[in-house]
Amino acid sequence: MKTKPLVSIIMNCHNGEKYLRKSLNSLIGQTYKNWELIFWNNCSSDKSKKIIKSFNDKRIRYFESSNLLKLYNARNLAIKRSKGEFISFLDTDDWWLKSKIQQQVQIFEKNKDLSFLYSNCYQYNQKLKKKYLYSTKVLPSGQITQKLLDDYRLGIVTVMLRRDIFKKKKFNNKYNIIGDFDFFLNLSINYEMRCIQKPLAYYRVHSSNYSTTHLSNYEKEMHSWFRFNSKKFKLKGFSINKLKMLNYKIKIKNFFQKFKL
């Protein structure tokens, strides 16, 4: 009987105790059982360590940072510790539908040339206690760079990648917010990206989302991204005009938040 491939789940945690149990339970309850969790505790001062240690599961592998790292530096270090043929990402405030891993592995096994798979998801509004479909439109598959530049709807919580990708590319260590946006956009130039249209995960929207509470950093990182990537994408024949509009919206939102207007 053929052994099912190992899937490595990367979970980076900095003071994520509030929703951590929900997230972990959605992993433990997966119909697909051959996985490992790389839990990277990034200098948490809350009860995150106590919570993860309370899960008596040999598939959970625990690591700690000696100093606070930027998120995408921590992601890279966690990936280095992983052993799976496939890599997925689950943050401490998000959760998965129970068949998420199984559905994605089955598609990979039938499509040996496929390296990147994502899906639709639900956004869960914590304040309203309501879920909303992230995209009501058909999400793109194939060579989707321009479609991502025009309307970026690719949640890292839905992604599964072949490990081989990380032998060639890594997340940019300087980012704390837009590292997956940068990584996936650049990846899309050379890789086909397949989408499962139905939602397989929940992304929790709450008052403590980092991109919401650190809008000035979000703006700075987007400005940096444009400075280093605009010319490259233009030379490859892509338009970044719609993405520029998104950047302007971030600037305006940050201005109003800064001055509490």
Image (cartoon, grey):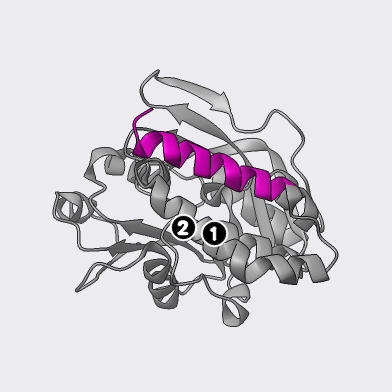
Q: Position of residue 27 (x, y in %)?
A: 41, 47
Residue pointed to by mark 1? 223
Residue 60 x %, y %: 32, 61
Secondary structure type for disc 1: helix
Asked if 241 appears above or below 3 in the picture, the reply is above
Tally of marks: 2
Compared to residue 205, the image places residue 107 above or below, namely below
Query: Label for residue 3?
Result: none
- Residue 161 visible from this viewpoint: no
Q: Amino acid at mark 1?
A: His
Classified by dominant secondary structure, the portion drawn in magenta counts as helix
The span shown in magenta is 242-261
Q: Label 2: how many residues lie within 10 Å, few (<14), some (14-19) or many (20+)?
A: few
> Mark 2 and mark 1 in contact (Cβ < 8 Å)?
yes
Residue 196 visible (yes or no): yes
Residue at 74%, 57% in the rendered image: 193
Q: Looking at the image, which residue is at 14% across and 52% down?
A: 50
Q: Which residue is mark 2?
A: 220
Callout 2 amino acid = Lys
| Callout 1 crowding tier (Cα within 10 Å): few <14, some 14–19, many ≥20 | some
Q: Quadrant of residue 189?
A: bottom right
Q: Is residue 13 left or right of residue 76?
A: left
Q: Element under label 2?
A: helix
Q: State yes or no: residue 258 in magenta.
A: yes
Please say if 87 is above or below 195: below
